[in-house]
Amino acid sequence: MSNFLSIATVSTTLRRLLQDAVQQDVTGATATTLRPDAPAGQLPNPGVNLFMYQVTPNSAWINADLPTRSSSGALIQRPVIALDLHYLLTFYGSDANLEPQRVLGSALRTLHARPIITAAMIQATLDAAEVEDPQHFLLGSNLGDDVERVKLTPLPLSLEELSKLWSVLFQTPYSLSVAYVGTVVLLESEQAPQRALPVRVRHISAVPFRRALIERIVDIDPANPLPESIEINDIVELQGSQLDGSVSLVRVGEAQLQPIPDSVRADRMRLLLTDPALRAGIQGVQVRYQDGSESNVAALILRPQIVVDQPAVTSGELPIDFDPVVSRSQRVTVYLNEHNPPANRAPFAYSFEAPEANGIDDPTVATTNRILFAMAGVEPGDYLVRVQVGGAESLLGVDAGGSYNQPLVSVP
């Protein structure tokens, strides 16, 4: 691949190729690389002017360098951009002596006979540049080492396209012109990719094609009327198919658990939810096996447990203790529903968000088990208290008659 000097190297090499041809065929003819609207005294007379008016991505090579980065954004190979160079060749001289047409014939014959810019042509250009100036800007070019050679092809521009090119870009009277495209120039970034250590030992193992499937996660407590209502310290059962095997771990959110010994079966396994890394909310559950295979990810709603140890709120703040602990980034909301409201009106209901960072002021602390909720505008009365953490709500207690009765807080 080549560096940023390659485009200028192509233009200079092409100019030298045309210069050598037209000066032999037409007396006094030269080749330049100026804008067509340059002052008349600077343009060749007679001769040919080479102007690159457009650069486009090469459709064949545009994705050849992908992927250049890993999923983490780290560079894994040097990016390469593939370009096509569009040139306008304009011919000048005395129309009375047909010099533009004679130079045109010389240039087109040469480009048809030598349509490829070879490594030898590039090296000759660099050698001539060094003779001209030992500090010439092209001396750092490495186009000659490119894996692809630049090939020149005439472009059949219509009269309308040529007229637009001259009237819009140059705004100068039209001169005899033809268009060529040079393809392809590969420009490589100088960024060095990160290389991983080589593989020292290769291990290849064959395992039967299988996929463990978790279909349902339930609490095994027979007294729980809602099997999907799961709290910390509960024993849960993963139900599905092909769950047996050498289990490495079961990931629940950020926690890594081991199944209860002797509970692993083809259609079920059990877990004790006691890891300190567990968090309330909607958590993904996935079984990982020692052979590297994994189950699907199933959803588990781990409900928070709360303790309201202040039966009456007199300060405008309601303290609530949580199990498991709450992280500073989790969204926590408390809900108050009036308990035993009078029959002649609708019950009062309120919700309050936790303070910023769930009240954790120390930036080095990640979790808390207690949050103070600021309350305002609450009518006096007794209220049932619920919280929602990460989309999972705490459960309410019920009395013998099946009515919700706790936890309660009184607002005087």
Image (tube, grey):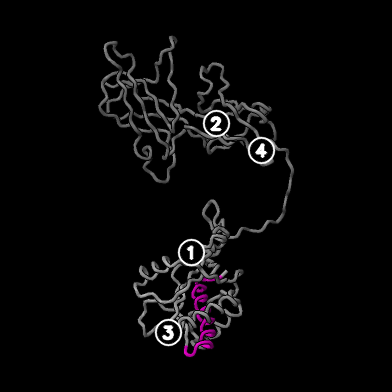
Q: Nearer the viewer, residue 187 or 51?
A: 51
Specify the farthest residue to the front: 96
Query: Mark 2 against mark 1, which lies toward the viewer?
Result: 1
**First in sequence: mark 3 or mark 2?**
3
Task: From the image, tell me which residue sits under label 4.
Answer: 289
Give the Cα separation between the discs numbered 3 and 4.
Answer: 81 Å
**First in sequence: mark 3 or mark 4?**
3
Image quadrant of residue 318? top left
Q: Residues within 10 Å of mark 2 (few under 14, many from 20)?
A: some
Instruction: Tell me which residue sits at (38%, 29%) in the image.
Output: 320
Q: Residues within 10 Å of mark 3 (few under 14, many from 20)?
A: many
> In the image, residue 42 lies at what x, y percent?
38, 84
Labels 2 & 1 near each other (Cβ < 8 A)? no
Give the Cα separation between the discs numbered 3 and 1.
Answer: 31 Å
Q: Amino acid at mark 2?
A: Thr
> In the image, residue 56 lies at what x, y percent?
48, 64
Give the Cα separation between the discs numbered 3 and 2.
Answer: 91 Å
**First in sequence: mark 2 or mark 1?**
1
Instruction: Tell me which residue sits at (45%, 34%) in the image.
Output: 325
Q: Residues within 10 Å of mark 1 (few under 14, many from 20)?
A: few
Q: Amino acid at mark 3?
A: Gly
Q: Nearer the viewer, residue 9 or 282?
A: 9
Q: Which mark is residue 274?
A: 2
294 versus 226 height, above or below: below
What residue range appears in magenta? 2-28
Q: Amino acid at mark 4?
A: Tyr
> Going by the image, does 7 lie left or right of 163?
right
Q: Which mark is residue 93?
A: 3
Residue 129 visible in the shown view: no
Asked if residue 96 lies in the magenta stretch, the reply is: no
Labels 3 & 4 near each other (Cβ < 8 A)? no
